[in-house]
Amino acid sequence: MNKQLLLGAEAVAVGAIDAGISGVYAYPGTPSTEITEFIQKSKDAQSRKIRSKWAANEKTAYEAALGMSFAGKRSIVCMKHVGLNVCADPFMNSAITGVNGGLILVVADDPSMHSSQDEQDSRAYGRFAMLPLLEPATQQEAYDAVRFGLDLSEAVKLPVVLRLTTRMSHSRAVIERKAMRDQNAFNPDVNTRQWILLPAIAKKNYAGLIDKQTAIEKSSAESPFNKVVEGKGKKAVIAFGIGYNYVMEVCKTNNLELPVLKISQYPLPKDMVQSFIDKYDDILIVEEGYPIYEELLRGFSDNKKFRGRLDGALPRMGELSPDAVAPALGVKPVVGQPVPDIMVNRPPALCVGCSHRDLYEELNSVLANYPNKCVFGDIGCYTLGALPPYSAINSCVDMGASITMAKGAAESGVHPAVAVIGDSTFTHSGMTGLLDCVNDNVQVTIIISDNSTTAMTGGQDSAGTNKMVDICKGLGVEPEHIVTIVPVKPRLEQNIEIIKKEIDYKGVSVILAQRECMQTLARKKKAAKK
């Protein structure tokens, strides 16, 4: 089929298949998960033997994709914005090594924090690493940008960043596919010294990265993703990525003929931007995320020509929309009927029958007798244990932080210091924290709520399934203090006794609370009936 109705994330996946990738590497994270899932289920990807299993975390995913690039093959690596923090080390250094086969980092940001801890803007990482960055405004551009980006990656011998946002990733449009490209032949890089970042080599490579900026800027200046929409008057708009869609919707709905400069490839095409801003007295800057380029265009002076997030013309935080952009373009927003009070927001809740429910009931029962208790939570479905009726955890900062925060708290005198972490999060970034606990013999209790899947993002494979006991033993936890419980109501009293015993142990203890996720179990039963 030449035309398909696809999510933005799916358009990226199809674009990658058609552009000749040999592998996709990823750790699941909303709003990027659907890219890898689509490739895993694609018959085209299967027939082409495209590698598509989940990685243990974003860092290992990026490094594996870099290894595929070393071998001359094309690859993409996918993650959400906070995942880029996890793989920042290889990402930044890959700008210094360069690439062989084309490599695209697809990073999906989450303005308004629909399912995230922050709404950081990954374009800052693109500028930080001095790499080309594409920010499609439409699903068709998302599809086209993958092929374009892989070609650009191989032309300049650098990784290319492709930035999506939640709205782009999770909304649908018709895309038109192009002919499939063959996968690259196996062709390992013969210039292996460039991959050895000893200081002398890294300095030379860094100078090469600086030299490549001219070619990167030229590509941006000639990019099909950057354009000027002609209009009338002395007021204008510079719109970035999906912000262009919001602006054009307002303009078309209200018959506005504003000049618009659309930017979807970075770095900024300097001459195009300068020529545009010289023509107009009032310029609204619309960018989804941080006011990165508004700050850049304003410079360090109080330039009254520009309006945007910094001066309140647009909301300073959160996701933009046509309704948010309209007032800044002089259009009164249409206000509908008020939502009646009976329509109360329903907060998210743990699924009925979820093993985390029983675990928190048991944990709360034990800790009720400890006035100085502190329970450090982590990233996953079980984070909902912070809400009533459980109110069972006291922190949730980042992947793996539960264990190391419990360690630091215990070393400060907190007792009991308990960490609650999921199986996928534990293998993602909790294992090193447990090793620190073992090495310092800290009195902490680590509860791994193991439901054999990465449940929060839809039930993807968990890297540590059926390996948890061996992993904990390998990290040095005493075998007699690696205990397994099954969090179900009939075992409530038995589990309470086990948890209490391990909390009172003056050393490192690990409790594996093991019961399969109800959602994945239901899907398995449904599939078995077919």
Image (tube, rainbow, N blue to C red):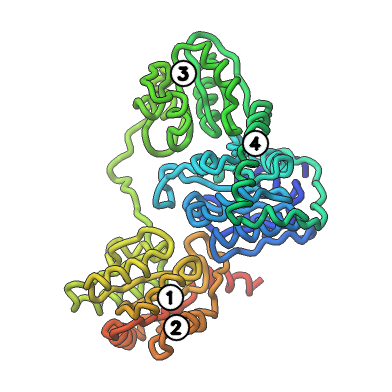
Which amino acid lies under the numbered mark 1 shown in the image of this protein? Leu
Earlier in the chain: of badge 2 and badge 4, it is: 4
Viewer-side residue, 128 vs 39: 128
Q: Do we see residue 256 in this rendering?
A: no
Q: Residue at x 44, y 14 (%)?
A: 282
The relative height of residue 115 versus residue 294 in the rendered view (above or below) is below
Q: Which mark is residue 476?
A: 2
Residue density around tag 3, few if under 14, some if 14–19, many if 20 or more, within 10 Å: many
Residue pointed to by mark 3: 283
**Closer to the observer: label 4 or label 1?**
4
Q: Is residue 399 visible?
A: yes
The quadrant holding residue 47 is: bottom right
- Residue topped by disc 4: 211
N-term mark: 2 or 1? 1
**Residue visible at 37% across and 24% down in the picture:** 313
Which of disc 1 and disc 4 is earlier in sequence?
4
Q: Are the residues at dot 2 and dot 3 in contact (C-beta closer than 8 Å)?
A: no
